[in-house]
Amino acid sequence: MSLTAHLIYFSPTGTTKKTITSVAQGLGAKSVVHYDVTPSDSSNKTVLSDGIVIIGTPVYAGRVPELCLQRMQRITAKGLPCVLVALYGNREFEDALVELRDFATRQGFKVVAAGAFIGEHSYSTQERPIAAGRPNSEDLRLAEQFGQQVAAKVNSGDLNTPEIAGDVPYKVLVKLGGVAPETVREKCTLCGKCAEVCPTGVITVSERVVTEADHCIMCCACVKTCEVDARPFNHPRIEERRAMLLKNCSQPKTPEVFL
Ligand SMILES: Cc1cc2nc3c(=O)[nH]c(=O)nc-3n(C[C@H](O)[C@H](O)[C@H](O)COP(=O)(O)O)c2cc1C
């Protein structure tokens, strides 16, 4: 495909970014431009006028994270073909893709395909693994294959929006935050990486690490970035969630695509 691929994504723990990069490879785009809206970003409004777009989001409680939509709002287009990708942690993606479809359409994109892929769950730990290591090589192969299928569809002149699994009205939005990962002072080296990767900027590091839990979105970017394992997220609410996921969502799911 002799087009530029624009990759727009929110990806605190990196699985969304990894997966859509493979989709872009499958598209065979001439060049790839990244719009990573994960960090707090004050970039100007952007109107995309050529190429093909991939929008990627993690699934939070069966929906698209509110912050992701807020940050993507500045990017619009006039009818560019667009592929949607939702990354979920092996539970369910529920209404995330239809919500993303409606959002992308309002932003001026023409949705031509969508896919739900699996990534390691944000709450996965070594002791309690949930979809650990995903996307794995097979997931990435399927993501690339999906990109090839999209390229074939667009090259044939078919820009129809497919039926996508999910319901409208969407699931009720779950309020995030109120609890946040903690810092183990004996392990912490005050390196500041947790603050750097936090999408909401709620972590400050001086002589100790302070986290403002009210505005934490529980994404676990800090947990997974900490090289010395000093950011556990073991609040009883999260432990309870882990136990439910281990009990009900241990059977690996396979990606699902809509073309
Ligand atoms: C607050 C929160 C809610 C989540 N809700 C779901 C969910 O409803 N279904 C699911 O399968 N995974 C869920 N996950 C897991 C993420 O969708 C999954 O880990 C995803 O791969 C993260 O994407 P990222 O690596 O790009 O940040 C949730 C994670 C968080 C932090």
Image (cartoon, rainbow, N blue to C red):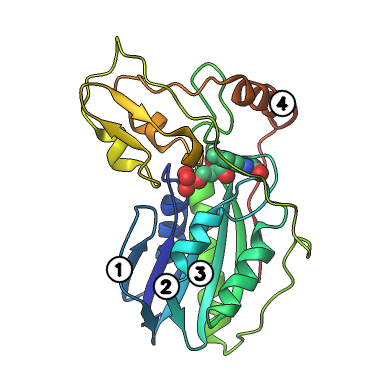
Disc 2 residue type (three-letter): Arg
Disc 4 residue type (three-letter): Met
- Closest to the observer: 62 or 19? 62
Check contact, mark 2 vs mark 3: CB within 8 A.
Answer: no
- Closest to the observer: 72 or 31? 72
Q: Which residue is mark 1?
A: 43
Placement of 193 over or under 152, stated as above or below? above
First of labels 4, 2 by sequence position: 2
Q: Nearer the viewer, mark 2 or mark 3?
A: 2
> Could you tell me which secondary element the residue under label 3 belongs to?
helix
CA gap between label 2 and label 3 equals 28 Å
Q: Nearer the viewer, mark 4 or mark 2?
A: 2
Position in image of residue 67 (x %, y %): 50, 55
CA gap between label 1 and label 4 equals 39 Å
First of labels 1, 2 by sequence position: 1
- Closest to the observer: 233 or 98? 233
CA gap between label 1 and label 2 equals 8 Å
Placement of 147 over or under 189, stated as above or below? below
Disc 3 residue type (three-letter): Gln
First of labels 1, 4 by sequence position: 1
First of labels 4, 3 by sequence position: 3
The C terminus: image quadrant: bottom right
Disc 1 residue type (three-letter): Ser
> Could you tell me which secondary element the residue under label 4 belongs to?
helix
Q: Is the residue indicated by label 1 positioned so its CB lies within 8 Å of ligand 1?
A: no
Check contact, mark 1 vs mark 4: CB within 8 A.
Answer: no
Check contact, mark 1 vs mark 2: CB within 8 A.
Answer: yes
Position in image of residue 84 (x %, y %): 56, 66
Q: Which mark is residue 74?
A: 2
